[in-house]
């Protein structure tokens, strides 16, 4: 049965889309306007949260993007994007995989909300400034690691790189890239050169145009 992924342009749902392209699995991409809970009310029948991503694989339904990366990698281990539990790098793999969402993406959602999505009278410049610093401080862990290794764990590209890679993409939309270290910038360039990443960008663009959805970047956190 073909996987269905519900996706907004450049939202967290880019993580599983990137994974699907890396794995070269068949899938159906259902594009939604942002925010879907306000602009695509029928979507609430599929996901009461009204958020993307939503991944449907037979009877499996998932709404967490980092968990989708782990799921897809584990279900298709021959592709080499997973790290097995018996591997000494397993703990590092899980840590990086979930750091991409819990530590690096979360603070950026506050920048989006209080810097862009709230009406002008509710915006909070101090919150934006504080959490930009918070994000950049946590990004030092990535900088330190990729200064001596091309990928985050197990000596190869894995789903953990997809998870962290999305957080880097989001920070480029927020104008934080000039504050990155040199090793992080080089790592981001490596990620962008991957054919799977390039196919994912092309797939979302083509699907958005075909389905009449705006193609501007729209991260999936809203007020």
Image: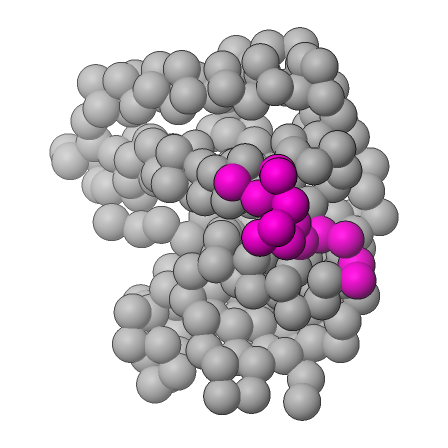
| Relative height, residue 123 to residue 199 (above, below) | above
Q: Position of residue 30 (x, y in %)?
A: 58, 75
Main secondary structure of the magenta stretch:
loop
Q: Is residue 208 visible?
A: no
Q: Nearer the viewer, residue 92 or 126?
A: 92
Is 82 part of what is drawn in magenta? yes
Question: Which portion, as a residue range, is magenta?
Answer: 78-91
Name the residue furthest left.
121
Q: Is residue 127 left or right of residue 42?
A: left
Q: Residue at x 76, y 38 (%)?
A: 156
Colour theme: one colour
Can you say whether 208 is above or below 102 in the image? Answer: below
Q: Is residue 79 left or right of residue 73?
A: right
Question: In the image, residue 85 lies at what x, y percent?
Answer: 58, 53
User: Which image quadrant is residue 76 in?
Assistant: bottom right
Residue placed most toward the observer, 176 or 167: 167
């Amino acid at each position: 049965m073909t996987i269905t992924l519900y996706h907004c342009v450049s939202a967290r749902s880019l993580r599983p889309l990137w994974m699907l392209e890396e794995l070269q699995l068949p899938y159906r991409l259902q594009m939604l306007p942002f925010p879907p809970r306000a602009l695509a009310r029928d979507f609430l029948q599929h996901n009461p949260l009204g958020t993307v991503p939503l991944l449907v694989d037979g009877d499996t339904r998932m709404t967490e993007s980092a968990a989708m990366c782990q799921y897809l990698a584990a279900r298709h281990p021959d592709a080499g994007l997973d790290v097995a539990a018996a591997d000494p790098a397993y703990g590092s793999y899980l840590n990086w995989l979930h750091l991409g969402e819990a530590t690096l993406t979360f603070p950026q959602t506050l920048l989006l909300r209080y810097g862009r999505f709230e009406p002008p009278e509710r915006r909070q410049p101090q919150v934006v400034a504080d959490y930009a610093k918070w994000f950049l401080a946590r990004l030092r862990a990535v900088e330190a690691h990729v200064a001596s290794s091309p990928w985050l764990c197990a000596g190869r590209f894995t789903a953990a790189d997809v998870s962290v890679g999305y957080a880097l993409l989001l920070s480029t939309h927020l104008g934080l890239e000039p504050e990155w270290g040199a090793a992080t910038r080089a790592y981001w360039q490596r990620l962008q050169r991957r054919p799977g990443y390039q196919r994912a960008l092309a797939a979302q663009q083509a699907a958005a145009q075909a389905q009449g959805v705006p193609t501007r970047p729209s991260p999936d956190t809203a007020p």
